[in-house]
Amino acid sequence: MSKISKAPFFQRPRLNTSVADKPAIPTRNQTAPAWSFSSLSSLGVGRRSRCQAKLSRGLAVGRNLSTRHNIASSHCRRMGSLRPLLICLALYLIANLCQGKVTFEKLTNQDYSGSVYYTVWNVSLYECLGWCRDESECAAAAFSFVVNPLTPNQETTCQLQNETQANRPTALSQRSVNTYFMVKLHLRTDSVCNRLWSFERVPNQSLRGLENAIIFTSNKEACLSACLAEVRFVCRSVEFNYVTKECRLSEFDRRSPGVYVHMVESQGVDYFENACLQPDKVCRGPKNYGYAPVNLPQTSLTYYIDLNYYLDKQILVNTRQECLQQCSLEREFVCRSVLFRAEPRTKKAICKLFHLDHIMFPDGAETFATPNPFPLLDTGDSTGVYLEAICANDTSKRNKPSKGNINLSMSQQQQQQQQKQQPPQSLSPTTVPFFPNTQDPSCDVYGVCYDVSIQCTDSKIIVYVKTNRHFHGRIYALGRSETCHANVLNSNQFRLDLSLSGQDCNTQSMGGVYTNTVVLQHHNVVMTRTDKVYNVRCTYEVTSRNISFGMMPIRDPDTMQVTASPEAPLPKIVILGIEGREANTVRIGDKLTFRIEIPEGTPYGIFARSCVAMAKDARSVFEVIDDRGCPVDANIFPRFREIGSSLESSYEAFRFTESYGVIFQCNVKYCIGKCEPVNCGIGMEKTSSWGRKRRSQPIEKEDSEMTLSHEILVLDFGDESVSSMRDVNSVNESTHYKESVLMMDSCASKTSLMALSVTSALLLVFYICTVAYFVAQRRVTKEFR
């Protein structure tokens, strides 16, 4: 149970003001005119009585008009005092709606002083930031944790500050071990991610000389918003000068290879790293993994990681490579390190993912030299291996977009070997020069050489062509020159897309192998002996790990074959609610749809098996689908049904007693075409479940499976305070392969709808009062007339 301590801030006395205490509104006291009847003494009694009656009626009419005038005047005064209040309230609500999206900046192992008004113990980082996000007066949150190896639980402390020194540029931070200091931000951009924080902040530091753009903004939030909204390049870091308001955007960060990265002390300048980067944007080139540059053995290093790293995600894997792939494709945070620990007893391995690495600490690699407060204990578990992500140089960007290159012919290989023996020239290492050679099958008699490569996708084959001279002509599929072609006008780089389905390009398929013939033709009408003919082939396998490229001459020197194997489409787990929307937070018993899907229009089918549900700490594991693909308990989790290219199972939400988070993990394989279902015997009935591969396409390697994981929050029946959990996207999914996700526009929040409703109601009241005022004024004018 969480312990909560409230400061006297919440015990402020409520101000009660009664009607009697309010000052009375002064009214106008009017005295009736003094009428004298002495001048009527000479009149007769009857005539005098008639005159007195007329005078009495005149007095009554005068009093009535005076009373109506007083009422109208009071109404006008009330309207005059209420109108500014309504306008100010409407402007305040509109300003709150337009102040931006709430997110956080994070400082590692640093703390700032401030006014703490709320403290809670033994909660997760997710819950701590959820409370600060919901509290309008919360300006920052200090989250600290202590791992005690003698107890199974992690002790945490969450302190919310309504006033913090972190927003003062001249304030100095204090070092604090195992502390994340989160400062609330309001960024006015649609590019704010749904992660717990959007930027990692390093105060009084700068990365000089590597900026791509320099702009001037009014404040820090505008500078960070500009980084997230940048489209000309990938903004990986940003610096803001609080004095000059200078904002420097850069595609480099502290981990960028190939450039001189040096952090310097800069008073009044803060360095920020973008934490909203997608997995394929974290590095400019490929991502590798290596040992941390610290002088510690793996036994001591892994023990230090367990004590001083806050666990972001933990999953079960089979191999170390699978653990690294999970880190490379993690979408809920930027994964920068992993801890892989094999468990011989369960024949499984634990993979822990972290957003931390040695660069993120204020003292860098020297942080690991801090002695541990607890002795090294022998728990009987394997020590494990700690690896950090390393961005490597991208040496293939200039030769892309192709994913494969044709193997060089013998003459080109010999020429390149000769060049290697010569002194190095000024040629770029990523550029392969073309040498005209009439005996080379990739060159024609005029000395024009062709570099042809292909890329296999889910729906088409893309043929890329590069020449050493400008090419003028056309490229087309043989036999489909009118429906599948591209005209080239004096260009040395061009492409042709060959669709896999339909008759437009006449792509042939057999057993998962798609082939076509491409013609490079100089003349627009006739073919000559200078034209080139290529046979292209894509092999769609049930595993996406084997990618092969090659070229061999066939029939004659002018006809060549280009082959490639594409990456399989990316599967994805989605949990839908009863309305068909993706569910992030649900309650026990809610009807949900568990779906494993791949893109439509691909030659693949999928099947799933060995699905488990486990608690967030991975201590409780419940198998829902066995290794054959059949449900273990159909009452809790029924069989999979094939819906189009997806697999679906409808079930009711459940959770474990010790954890709100439920992580589903499934092994998914591919079939060429549709997969055959497996017969599951349930009692006297036999049902079919799509949990077995087709017999015609066997898979020999067990590690060719993809492991998908997806997390959902399941609340108890009586839990009401879930607003903090709903604001932050709690879905945590990962696959072994790079995927692209289409971000849908999020629905309006409850706070926005309530503010809009209040504003509309106030405007309606203002309109009614205005109409009533003019109607009353018109009536008073008629009475006076």
Image: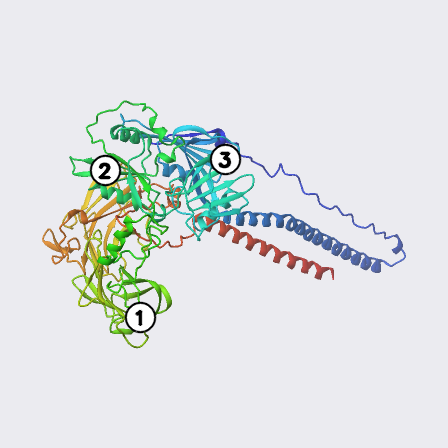
Sequence-earlier tag: 1 or 3 = 3
The residue closer to the viewer here, 447 or 262, is 447
Q: Nearer the viewer, mark 1 or mark 2?
A: 1
Q: Secondary structure at mark 2?
A: strand
* Residue 567 in sight here: no
How many neighbours does mark 1 have within 10 angstroms: few (below 14), some (14-19), or many (20 or more)?
Answer: many
Q: Position of residue 493 (x, y in %)?
A: 35, 62
| Relative horizontal placement of residue 54, taking residue 353 as reference (left or right) | right
Sequence-earlier tag: 3 or 2 = 3
Q: Residue 361, located in which quarter of the rendered image?
A: top left
Q: How far is disc 1 from disc 2 in space, using C-alphas?
A: 51 Å
Q: Which mark is drawn over residue 485? A: 1
Q: Residue 205, relative to residue 557: is it above or below?
A: above
Q: Which mark is drawn over residue 266? A: 3
Residue plotted at (74% across, 55% down): 60
The residue closer to the viewer here, 319 or 616, is 319
Residue type at tag 3: Ser
User: Residue pushed farthest front?
Assistant: 422
* Residue 738 in sight here: yes
Q: Residue 678, located in which quarter of the rendered image?
A: bottom left
Task: Name the quarter where the N terminus is drawn.
Answer: top left
Residue type at tag 2: Ile
Q: Residue 15, relative to residue 465: is it above or below?
A: above
Q: Secondary structure at mark 3?
A: loop
Q: How far is disc 3 from disc 2 in space, using C-alphas?
A: 42 Å
| Relative horizontal placement of residue 521, taking residue 621 as reference (left or right) | right
How many neighbours does mark 2 have within 10 angstroms: few (below 14), some (14-19), or many (20 or more)?
Answer: many
Q: Nearer the viewer, mark 3 or mark 2?
A: 3
Q: Position of residue 545 (x, y in %)?
A: 22, 51
Residue type at tag 1: His
Sequence-earlier tag: 1 or 2 = 2
Residue at the disc numbered 2: 350
